[in-house]
Amino acid sequence: MTNQKLGRPSKETNALVRGLVSDLLWFGKIETTAAKAKSVRSQAEKLITLAMNTYEDTVKVTKEIKDDKGVKVKTEVVNDGPKKLQARRKIMSYVYDRQEQRLPKESIDAFKARTEGINHPLLEKIFNVYAPKYAKRAKEVGQGGGYTRIIKLGQRRGDAAEMVIIELI
């Protein structure tokens, strides 16, 4: 999956890049070495493009659900379409799942209410935040790609590795 071995066996390299891509998509910005950042950029942009091209593919379905009294009630549910479902599964197989954290001074009840119904917060963030944002930008500017920025920080003390910050634009 990655272009460079980064001084590790391929299994370890793939796990390292998957972890860094997951952190980049979750936090929006990470600090790492230049070689790792180039590998992360490649994979992150592919995942964002995949989500961006399929995030609007939804299907409305009518289901019968029993309520508290046992009466069948018809409700409309919005499900993923086939393209979005395939993209969601592909992204799920690549990124590591990150769990939502409680905010400082947030009560347990407020945290449960905020995260209710969200099983995979990173996927929801990719499809509900990043995909619409970058699709809008692609329509306005007429350009796809270029979702990340690498800022050089200088050399790390100790081994003189080139350090960078990679962030989502």
Image (spheres, grey):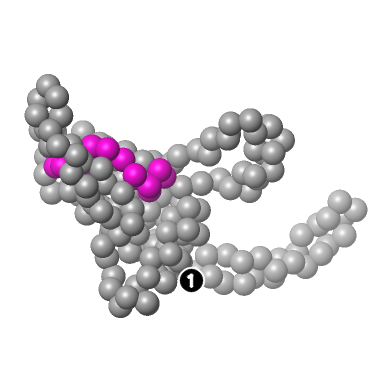
Nearer to the camera, 144 or 99: 144
Residue 21 falls in image quadrant: top left
Q: Amino acid at mark 1?
A: Glu
Image coords of residue 8 (percent x, y):
13, 32
- The residues colored magenta run 24-37
Identified at 27% across, 38% down, the residue is: 31
Question: Which residue lies most toward the front here?
Answer: 154
Identified at 18% across, 44% down, the residue is: 152
Neighbours of disc 1 within 10 Å: few (<14), some (14-19), many (20+): some
Identified at 74% across, 66% down, the residue is: 75
Image coords of residue 130 (percent x, y):
42, 59
Magenta span contains residue 75? no
Residue 33, visible in the rendered structure: no
Instruction: Tell me if residue 9 comes above or below residue 151 in the rendering.
Output: above
Nearer to the camera, 78 or 17: 17
Q: How many marks?
A: 1
**In the rendered view of the protein, which quadrant contains the C terminus?**
bottom left
Q: Which residue is mark 1?
A: 56
Instruction: Tell me if residue 82 comes above or below residue 101 in the rendering.
Output: below
Nearer to the camera, 27 or 54: 27
On the rendered structure, is 31 left or right of 75?
Answer: left
Residue 13 falls in image quadrant: top left
Identified at 36% across, 41% down, the residue is: 23
Image coords of residue 119 (percent x, y):
56, 45
Residue 19, visible in the rendered structure: yes
Magenta span contains residue 28? yes
Question: Which residue lies most toward the top here?
Answer: 158
Nearer to the camera, 124 or 35: 35
On the rendered structure, is 122 left or right of 159?
Answer: right
On the rendered structure, is 90 left or right of 153?
Answer: right
